[in-house]
Image (tube, coloured by chain):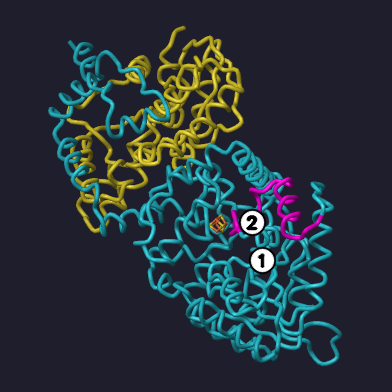
Amino acid sequence: MRVPEAAIRKTLADANLQLAIYTNTGRFKENRSKAVAAEVLPEYQELRTRAAAIKRHTLDFLDVYLLQFESAVEAHGGKVIWASTGEEAADFILKLAKERAASLIVKSKSMTSEEIDLNERLAHHELEAVETDLGEYILQLAGQKPFHIVAPAIHMTRNDVADVFTEKLGIERDTVIENQAMTARRVLREKFLAAGIGVTGANFLAADAGAVVIVENEGNARLSHSAPPVHVAIAGIEKLIPRVRDLGVFLDLLGRSASGQALTSYTSIVSGPKRAGELDGPEEFYVVLLDAGRTKLLADKEKRESLQCIRCGACLNACPVYRKIGGHNYPWVYSGPIGKVITPQFQGRGKDPWLPFASSLCGACAEVCPVKIDIPGLLLQLRREAVAADPADRLLFRAWAWLMTRPAMYGMLARIGLRFSGVEMGPLAAWRAERDFPAVPEKSFRALWKERKK
Amino acid sequence: MAMVDVLERLGFTVEFRREQTCCAQPAFNSGYHTEARTVAAHFLDTFGDADTIVVPSGSCTSMITHHYAELFAGDAKRQQQVRELTPRVFEFSQFLVDVAQFDDLGASFPHKVTYHDSCHALRELGLKDAPRRLLGKVRGLELVEMGAAEECCGFGGLFSVKFAPISGAMARTKVESIVATGATHVVSVDSSCLMQLRGALARAGHRIETVHLAEVLASRG
Ligand code: SF4
């Protein structure tokens, strides 16, 4: 795909949208930086170092931890399903729904399920899957994809939500946020009670305990995995951490990095179906472990760190490009800096070759990443691979390198160049479309230096 | 030339090598390592025997000190050269404060000024205090921090041309933040940021001037 230039321009020109993106990401960004400030959390850098080290270690020994996880899940009466593609994951859920005669699925927020278009695949077989996270629910009604990996409907105002509700639920227009939440709640309660299967994502998978860890603020994930008789958690294989006791480090970082919360409102650690004598919980428990491009990336030592991501969204909120173009102009569900890094790696480089180039390499993402992913470094690496495959500007750079190793020529051209800066073509025109061209100095530094040393 | 003035005033002998051209960042950042290596090698050969190399740009400095080693991966001879050279390469404000240990240069610049953190100076070189300390000692200068001091100006080399609308939008946000301070001058240690800001300020019809830190420090106002 080429750069979606028209769509980007449209986003940039939409003043309301710009304001919504900038203020909402700004609030997250601000809250994050307060929550990790040295006065509040002196051990912040230490936590990052440990989190990065744990993730790196887990990825290096992922085969071992995956098997350990599987046996622990089975020991508690659950089952692990290995899905190498999104299709396989969806097929498993479809088959399960058929066997259990379930026609309704409740879902809590899961980027992994978005990644494989789970809802669409299920709908294709007349299986209704209802999103229960408020933001996701609104988007599902509106027929949109998440705008942000943590706050999916960050771009919508309460007026937008009122319109969607009126149109899709046939209720009277109401712009009060609390009332909107109550409306969603009313609808969703019914769904929770009627659903045959609850599908959740997973923030972490603890190998030693065979536990799925789900972090959320609304309580809907808790209901999704405990109310229906069957719980299916779907997660990428990179979500593993070795032990439950490693969780502390990640929970300290995740909420703070995402929204500035010291701890999110609900943290569920689920390790199997209801046991004998327990009152609630599902009868059946499945964990779908998704590959979908991950093992390929795992084999790439230099870029493996892309899999360390805990999807906190901090890099999106810090990114000056994301804060302008928003989430929907990225080609895939993963937007922002981490999206630029994993999209070409999961989906293949050829699809959106421009993506790694759409960055000023300012480094704000790496600065806030709780697991220290070197996003600018990875972008540079991806650029290198992209131009190796399609060296569109090679001649230009070859000429440039030739000139830059010939100082006399360079000096002369610089002098001539000063005279030609009024020309309206190529890059100069692109520059001038957005800003003025600086006034040209009368004399070059070289000339001034010559005079001075006379 | 302002940087030369400041350094000479402090008693340093400044030399300008006519052979010098570029640090190679444009090619490196665009993924063209072969071409970048050619130019970086030229840099190493030009400056190999200099005592100290002071660079009036945070971005070029970090290209040399943070990326040359990677660029020459697998080339032992060049890597050795890089190892020898990089400890002697400094960004201008870094050199003044950390190496020469000066902060008061007797400059005077009676204006209200705001400082733009260039991304590479701030995040790769860790230069947040040095330029502010230098500005703090300038007579008559009032430093007002802008809300988005650490936000990128949107330049990013070829990014500013290839993704001009995004780059322009980023610059406009920065401009709003600068204007809100009421400053008459915006100062930075990177000419490329200043060029971007100058263009965006002018386009928006503001009369705020962009000046390099060296120009402020050279000024006797
Ligand atoms: S890359 Fe880092 S900052 Fe971005 S979402 Fe992942 S963990 Fe968070």
Q: What is the spatial separation of the Cα atoms under label 2 and label 1, in whole angstroms?
A: 9 Å
Region of the chain picked out in magenta, as a range = A144-171
Q: Label 2 amino acid?
A: Pro
- x, y (%) of residue A105? 70, 77
> Which color is chain B depicted in?
yellow
Instruction: Say what secondary structure mark 1 lies in.
Output: loop
- x, y (%) of residue A82? 53, 84
Decide: is A356 above or below A440.
Answer: below
2 and 1 marks in contact (CB < 8 Å):
yes
Q: Residue at x 60, y 54 (%)?
A: A148
Decide: is B184 above or below B29.
Answer: above
* Mark 2 closeness class: few <14, some 14–19, many ≥20 residues within 10 Å: many
Q: Residue at x 22, y 40 (%)?
A: B44
The answer to whether residue A252 is seen in the rendering is: yes
State the image quarter where residue B24 is shown: top left
Q: Earlier in the sequence, mark 2 or mark 1?
A: 1
**CB at mark 1 closer than 8 A to ligand 1?**
no
Task: State which chain disc 2 sits on.
Answer: A
Q: Which residue is mark 1?
A: A109
Q: How many marks?
A: 2
Q: Label 1 amino acid?
A: Lys
* Mark 1 closeness class: few <14, some 14–19, many ≥20 residues within 10 Å: many
Q: Residue at x 71, y 54 (%)?
A: A164
**Magenta residue check for A148:** yes
Is A321 on the left-hand or right-hand side of A184? left
Q: Which residue is mark 2?
A: A152
> Which color is chain A depicted in?
cyan
Ligand 1 is found in which quarter of the picture?
bottom right
- x, y (%) of residue B16? 23, 24
Instruction: Say what secondary structure mark 2 lies in.
Output: loop
